[in-house]
Image: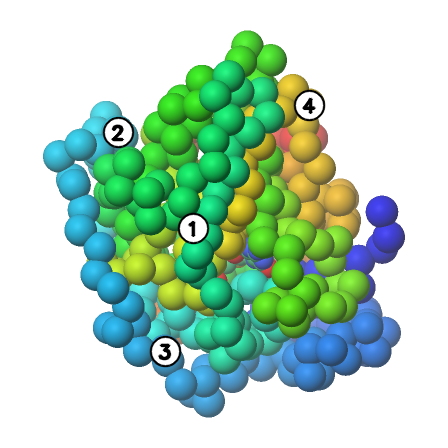
Amino acid sequence: MTEPKLRPSDITPEELVQAHKSSRRSFLKSAALTAAGAAGFGGGLITLSTKRGVVRPPDVSTLPALSVTPASSSAAPFAASLAADDELTSVEDITTYNNFSEFGLDKGDPAENAGSLKVRPWSVVVDGEVEAPKTFDIDRLMSSFPLEERVYRMRCVEAWSMVIPWLGLSLGALIRSVNPTSRAKFVQFTTLLDREQMPGQRTGVLDWPYREGLRMDEALHPLSLLAVGLYGRTLPNQNGAPIRLVVPWKYGFKGSKSIVRITLTEKQPPTTWNSAAASEYGFYANVNPSVPHPRWSQASERRIGDLTRRPTLPFNGYAADVAELYAGMDLAKYF
Ligand code: MTE
């Protein structure tokens, strides 16, 4: 695995950099060292401030509306967690402040550049340790499983957060529909690999395609969602159209965007950020205020839209639902 030229910390919002002045010099040095490698991104790497205000928010009202089937929620026992009572983040912020490195490194780049991503036709292969591997056309997938609205907090490893009203289908329901074998212990998510459509993939900042993974019990947990929409409409490209993973108790980088393959495996699969820098980005990536990132604290976060920081909650506030998945594990070791 080659050393990554980019880390999420390299694209950390400026206020975080300011808050960690002691590491700022090395941060800037690292940004400068990697600038050459990022030339294909149009110099986005060392543009530390976001382009919010410059980026024209995409008109999401033109995206097709989606209907939900709330009565069928597979996660009914977790009702309290399905609708975070925090104030929703604005649709403008959700759709113009993004991480999607296939489309650039500045927070505004995905909104500017992802419009060209062709999201139809699109299919998702579900294979590996399953008795009935299947290739789903995205529209069939969306009509075969009930779509539910889930208002979840999203906590990025960079210490900012949002509250997003997703629309999606239960990941567990999809997995169960292909009959996992007894050897299935993990699930790997693979994102589209297409250097023509995704300019970031023409650079070596990450090992493409973007990949993530979960343990089977995490994937089958009722809170795990495959999102196909937000704010009542089809998912905007910059948020991972046509289908992306949402695991609300984990750092946002677990949420692979524009998924084309879901593979059940016997062994823990390699994942993009963990392969890039294992000491900084664990496989588990559970939100944990008491395990700092090697270069900054994870004890607090800035909710996008707020001026002040707030404490970060263990498992992003979903501990009552998911902490038991990790009973007996040393969460500082398996971070
Ligand atoms: N998925 C892909 N394919 N490429 C990425 O660069 N970035 C991750 C995750 N999924 C990323 C990705 C990171 S670091 C975060 S915080 C979330 O997407 C951001 O999701 P959002 O832009 O919809 O808020």
**Closest to the observer: 292 or 72?**
72
**Residue 278: percent from left, percent from top:** 76, 43
Q: In this rendering, is residue 237 above or below 69?
A: below
Q: Rounded to the nearest whole Å, what is the CA distance between mark 3 and mark 1?
A: 18 Å
Q: CA distance from mark 4 to mark 3?
A: 40 Å
Camera-side mark, 4 or 1: 1
Residue pointed to by mark 1: 243
Where's residue 86, x and y in %? 27, 54
Identity of the amino acid at label 1?
Ile
Residue at image position (80%, 58%) is 4
Q: Is residue 201 visible?
A: yes
Q: Which residue is mark 2?
A: 74
* Mark earlier in primary sequence (4, 1): 1
Residue at mark 3 to residue at mark 2: CA–CA distance = 32 Å
Identify the residue under disc 4.
267
Frontmost residue, 7 versus 240: 240
Secondary structure type for disc 4: loop
Q: Which residue: 31% across, 78% down? A: 59
| Residue occupying the point 70% across, 71% down | 21
Q: Quadrant of residue 96?
A: bottom left
Q: Quadrant of residue 319?
A: top left
Q: Earlier in the sequence, mark 4 or mark 3?
A: 3
**Disc on res. 58:** 3
Q: Earlier in the sequence, mark 2 or mark 1?
A: 2
The answer to whether the residue labelled 3 contacts the one labelled 2, judged by CB atoms less than 8 Å apart, is: no
Closer to the camera, 198 or 326? 198
- Which circle, 2 or 1, is nearer the viewer? 1
Packing grade of label 2 (10 A; few <14, some 14-19, many >=20) is: some
Tag 2: residue type? Answer: Ser
Left/right placement of residue 260 relative to residue 306 reads: right
